[in-house]
Image: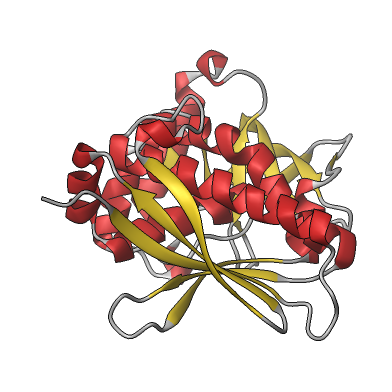
Amino acid sequence: QQNETNRQLQVKICSGDEFVDMEYSLETLKGYSGAITTIAGAIVEKKVPEKLNPADGVRAKLRGAYIGSYIQDFELAITDKQKIIDFNEIGEEVFSEGIAYFLHVACYLEPPQLSVKAENILKDLEGIEDEILEKISPRVKQMNKISKMNGYPVILSCISTVDGETKEIVKIDRITAENLYNPKCDSDFSNIEVIITRYNSFTGSGRLLVEGETKTTPFKFEGQYAKISSGFKKKLAKNLGNNTAKEEDEWDYLSLVVKAIRNKSGKVIIYLIHRVE
């Protein structure tokens, strides 16, 4: 019986030939460690860890480092027997998809296309998705520290246990840092025409595609979700269902009254829904 299972990972700070500030890089690595172990614990146990404790059987361990752009290998080590069973059942590729999803969402990036198995895993986590994102939020800001201060991109990759090849999970850069540090909310409401591409009925959050655009944007309701009318919620769910199997020229659009939250460059990072028309 296995006493430990590992997922090999790598953080690369793309600094070229420049020296890497030790304080910023350590805070960045600390952010990756905390965010990944929190997400990992939630995926295998289907609940959010209250605090990061090695005794819980999930932790990050440093491995080798390289010269040049600063590259740090580390591993996610799972030692709890039941969590090892759960991890092996999920599979390391799907597990990496789950980590990629939460880190993209936390950085206001469009998540990558997910496998059917990964979608099913996330479906099981819908009830605690917002709790996971809230828990990792301060760690994700730490992940962006060196990009904010020095402008260096940072790439998190998983390392194949078969051939040692790396596969990118998420890329942090100055844009993601702008998304997380000092975003501003529009003072005025806007009317937008959208289709709903993802909707979590437990939390009221999801993603939408504005008419004429090619990339989706996250949304959530303005105010407490419990107080939102069931009619508004049903309209979102219906729009998602209606457009699932349709071609683009057949999409049914939904009119929303929203406020946009923007990063420093003015890009919309999330819409707050005020009303569904």
* Camera-nearest residue between 129 and 173: 173
Left or right relative to 209: residue 153: right
- 160 up-or-down from 26: above or below: below
Q: Quadrant of residue 212?
A: bottom right
Residue 252 on image: x %, y %:
47, 54
> Can residue 90 be seen in this snapshot?
yes
Residue positioned 64% across, 48% down in the render = 31
Q: Residue furthest top?
A: 227
Residue positioned 26% across, 51% down in the render = 4
Numbered disc total:
0
- 152 up-or-down from 43: above or below: below
> Can residue 195 be seen in this snapshot?
no
Residue 192 on image: x %, y %:
69, 48
- 170 up-or-down from 49: above or below: below
* Camera-nearest residue between 275 and 112: 112
* Camera-nearest residue between 216 and 2: 2
Residue 178 on image: x %, y %:
82, 55
Colour scheme in use? secondary structure
Q: Quadrant of residue 14?
A: bottom right
Residue 65 on image: x %, y %:
60, 73
